Image (cartoon, rainbow, N blue to C red):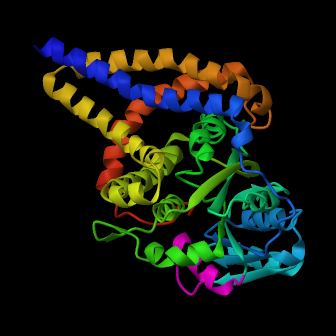
Amino acid sequence: MLDWLTGVLIIFAMIVSCYPVLMYTSGLFINLYCKRFDVKRDYSYKPTASVILSCFNEGHTVYETIKSLRMSDYPQDKLQILAFDDCSKDDSFEWIKKAAQDFPNVVATLNERNKGKAHTFLDGLDLSTAEVVVGVDSDCIFDEHAISELMACFTEPNICAVGGRVGISNADETWLTRCQAVYYALSFLVLKSPEKLFRKVQCLSGPLVAIKRECFDAVREQVEKRNFLGIRVTNGEDRALTQILLRNGYSTYLNTDAVCWTAVPSNISGYLSQQLRWRRSAVGQWLDALARFPIMFKNNTFLCAFFSLMPIFVMFSWNVLFITSGLMGHLLIVLIKILLFHMLLSPILALAFFYMSKHHLKRERVASIGVLTWSLIIMSLWFPFSALFVTLFALSTLDDGGWVTRA
């Protein structure tokens, strides 16, 4: 009886594992054959834009961030930068003030108390009168065409927000940063393609996202009152805002030609801390989406609900699988077979990404197909561990807020 149940559990795990494979292969197909369904960009569209930047303990990095934004090819008289220092303990505000002196249309503001990125963004919105607000991270470097690329996608009337792609600036530092470079490239260039096709991108990344002012104003009250089971939530503002916009019937889009670069953790402790913050945000939003499923289904499409809810099904299916296997005394054999299955899937993912890699390996700073392949294998082995331990720990610490950038 136990052997039969174990077999059922293993088959169930393999079925669940097929979800990321389905997303990657469908993403590749869309990239190959569905380009004609991309948003028709209008580069003559140049609305006024305010970039809102919130900084905490970034030092000289924030100056380089502002400098890269001011080097943008976007009309300088239509681009304002609102730079906030959120009570940093270092010399960040001095660098912000220097940027305000060196570059036009940069406004330097020191918060009277530490508010966090989400609340500071709302303060910036109050100071701005622009037609479009752009949220960025204070530790990123931006491509000169990034702002123009974002604005060019507001050609379909229901698109209220457009996100950009995040690349890795320190990809060659360690094996861990190389793996993250591969994962970022896969996520933006392949995994999000189905969501992009249907204008239902589930999470527009906080490092680079543009939002129509009128659309944000329409949902601002929901953003300000964001909570989970009565607990005030302050992290994961990018995912939360995207989900709120989708629930209200708006469309979201991703332009992978709008690019910024950021440094990622180069050691295990930093990486685990980052993943926990992100998973905490994701789990909260997935559960919130589950609770609000009727509203989402009414205002959107079935596919939007699928994109939003399927990840939580996969994550919690892994947890049910591991816990049940442990209680049955078959955890070890189940884990071994699952890991072997994932290692067989990794070459499939590598081949699926091969076409994209010919165009993007160098730009994403992934050295070779060999690096790509072993990075995928490491990622595939990490996924079961992440699904179990990181998800459970994130679920138990949903009320833990704080800054999502370096402190």
Residue that appears at 41% across and 26% down: 17
Q: Quadrant of the rendered structure where residue 319 is?
A: top left
Looking at the image, residue 118 sits to the left or right of residue 170; the answer is left
Residue that appears at 57% across and 23% down: 349
Residue 340 appears at what percent x and percent y? Answer: 42, 15
Residue 378 vertical position relative to residue 259 in the rendered view, above or below: above
Looking at the image, residue 141 sits to the left or right of residue 404; the answer is right
Q: Nearer the viewer, residue 160 or 400?
A: 160
Residue 131 vertical position relative to residue 170 in the rendered view, above or below: below
Q: Nearer the viewer, residue 318 or 169?
A: 318
Looking at the image, residue 173 sits to the left or right of residue 242; the answer is right
| Res 160 seen here | yes
Residue 227 appears at what percent x and percent y? Answer: 36, 69
Q: Nearer the viewer, residue 150 or 173?
A: 150
Residue 121 vertical position relative to residue 186 in the rendered view, above or below: below
Residue 266 appears at what percent x and percent y? Answer: 61, 42
- The span picked out in magenta is 111-129
| Res 175 seen here | no
In the rendered view of the protein, which quadrant contains the C terminus? bottom right
Residue 209 appears at what percent x and percent y? Answer: 66, 61
Looking at the image, residue 15 sits to the left or right of residue 59; the answer is left
Q: Nearer the viewer, residue 391 or 127?
A: 127
In the rendered view of the protein, which quadrant contains the N terminus? top left
Residue 388 in the magenta stretch? The answer is: no
Number of disc labels: 0
Q: Residue furthest left?
A: 1
Q: Quadrant of the rendered structure where residue 281 is?
A: bottom left
